Image (cartoon, rainbow, N blue to C red):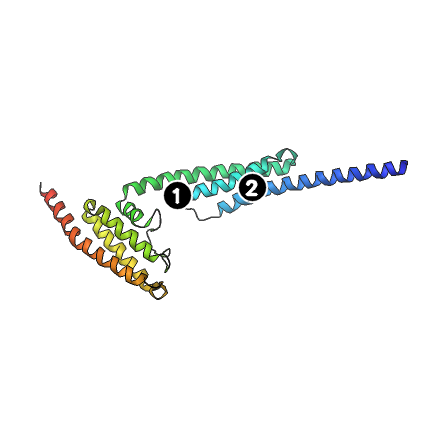
Amino acid sequence: MKKMNVLMTTGILLVVLAACNTEADEAVKSADNVNVYVDSIENLTPVYTTEYWATIDDGYRMRVVKSDESIEILGETDKEKLAASKLRYETLKAKYEANILATEKAVASDYRVILRNRLFGEGMIGNDMGFGFANANNLLNIYDNFVNTVADNKDSFTREDWDEIKVLYEALDSRKNTVEKELPDGDNRKIAGLKIRFATLKATNRGGAKAEENRESKQ
């Protein structure tokens, strides 16, 4: 009987110890997830936009919440490593927030960036004028949004706006030539119709914008 009690007690202790070891291992794993995540952020090529940082921050907070649930059972070395990672993250956060603010101020004062965002979406066109985001499946929608946006705002565009619109349109056309053979049936004809509409808008309004600016400059 005593032997059986001893065996039962030993078995219970082994189960308890195994559970403790499992919890400790999970705590270390959760802390390491935070450490590795911060390492990966430091190695990223920065993109200073609010949306990009929000995604990074969401991932960090999710990992920290998980790690903090078991922080009390971490060893001192692991706690110190986790604290160092959190400090590094706060430094990264301050850097991103400062650069995001500076970028937003620059964007707000650059009519080209404002115009590109209106015509193609926030941050889609950078200084390299790359149109890699445009493909055979979304090209018709891009043309449609471009032409409709021009039509809706034609009366407010300046001469500089129209010059930038012309450059953007030519770049979009160049991208179309690259993917034209892959366009779904009917898209090429619809795009051709949008191109005719744009040509009419430009011919009708670009000259008027220049004439209006010339009159204002003489006053």
N-terminal of the pair, mark 1 or mark 2, is 2
Instruction: Say whether residue 207 is visible.
Output: yes
Is disc 2 surrounded by few (<14), some (14 to 19) or many (20+) residues within 10 Å?
many
Say which of 52 and 204 sits in front: 204
Amino acid type indicated by mark 2: Val
Residue most toward the right?
1
Is disc 1 surrounded by few (<14), some (14 to 19) or many (20+) residues within 10 Å?
some
- Residue 166 location, x and y as percent? 23, 55
Using the rendered view, name the quadrant where residue 28 is placed: top right
Disc 1 designates what residue? Answer: 49
Instruction: Say whether residue 129 is visible.
Output: no
Using the rendered view, name the quadrant where residue 143 is placed: bottom left
Say which of 193 and 7 sits in front: 193
- Residue 140 location, x and y as percent? 32, 57
Q: Seen in the image, is 6 located left or right of residue 167?
A: right
Q: How many marks?
A: 2
Q: Are marks 1 and 2 in contact (CB under 8 Å)?
A: no
Where's the N terminus, which quadrant? Answer: top right
Q: Seen in the image, is 184 located left or right of residue 13?
A: left
Circle 2 SS class? helix
Q: Residue at coordinates 85% horizontally, 39% vertically from top-left?
A: 7
Disc 2 designates what residue? Answer: 34
Circle 1 SS class? loop
Residues under labels 1 and 2: Cα distance?
22 Å
Q: Residue at coordinates 23% horizontally, 49% vertically from top-left?
A: 151
Q: Residue at coordinates 28% horizontally, 41% vertically from top-left?
A: 109
- Residue 207 location, x and y as percent? 14, 52
